[in-house]
Amino acid sequence: MADVNRGNRPLSPHLQIYRPQLTSITSILTRITGNGLILAVLLIVWWLLAAATGPEHFAIADGVLRSWFGKLVMAGSIWALWYHTLAGLRHLWFDSGRGLDIPTAEKLGWGIIAGSVLLTFATIILF
């Protein structure tokens, strides 16, 4: 049977109308950083395999990792690791039933962003 009431129902909000909240942005970033970390691990595994294969293969892999692009990728990976870790801790906190109100969730979101940047700079400076 055809839906005769189809034109009277409201449309779902779409990207032109919808204003993303901080919690949705941090959730999306958690997924992006998780996938980015997979790529970083593959790069590190390639470097280790090249080291085990021989000096000519290692020179290529080491040259890539020590280039400005390799250093940029590794710095981004450090940020992604800190961000993903802090977001995971926040998720554990949410799973306990705490911090689910909007003001607390937004404070935790900003805390994850600021904390990941600070911890990234601390890691780069210390190591």
Image: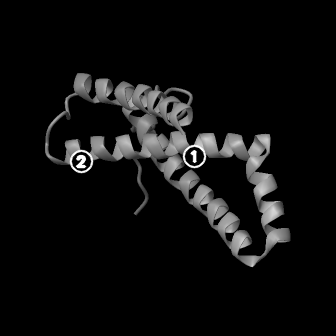
Kindly identify the residue that appears in the image at 51 percent across and 26 percent down: 17
* Image height of 38 relative to 54, above or below: above
Residue 46 on image: x %, y %: 69, 67
Pointer 1 or 2: first along the chain: 1
Image coords of residue 39 (percent x, y): 62, 58
Give the quarter of the image for residue 86: top left
Query: Viewed as shown, does residue 32 lie left or right of 86?
Result: right
Image quarter (top left, top right, bottom left or bottom right) of the C terminus: top right
Would you call the spot at circle 1 few (<14 residues within 10 Å), some (14-19), or many (20 or more)? many
Q: Looking at this view, name the residue that lies furthest to the bottom.
A: 53
Where does residue 2 sit, x and y in percent of width and height?
43, 58
Q: Would you say 87 lies left or right of 71 here?
A: left
Q: Which colouring convention does the figure follow?
A: one colour
The amino acid on which the numbered mark 1 sits, given as a three-letter code, is Ser
Quadrant showing the N terminus: bottom left
Which circle marks residue 92 in the picture?
2
Q: Residue 52, relative to residue 22: is it above or below?
A: below
Q: Between residues 41 and 15, which one lies in front from this camera angle?
A: 41
Mark 1: secondary structure: helix
Query: Which residue occupies the foreground of this view, 113 or 115?
Result: 115
Instruction: Count neighbours of disc 2 (C-alpha within 10 A) and say few if under 14, some if 14 to 19, many if 20 or more.
Output: few
**Marks 1,2: beta carbons within 8 A:** no
Question: Foreground: 121 or 9?
Answer: 121
Residue 77: mark: 1
Residue 75 appears at what percent x and percent y?
61, 40
Q: The residue tagged with tag 2: helix, strand or loop?
A: helix
Q: Residue furthest left?
A: 97
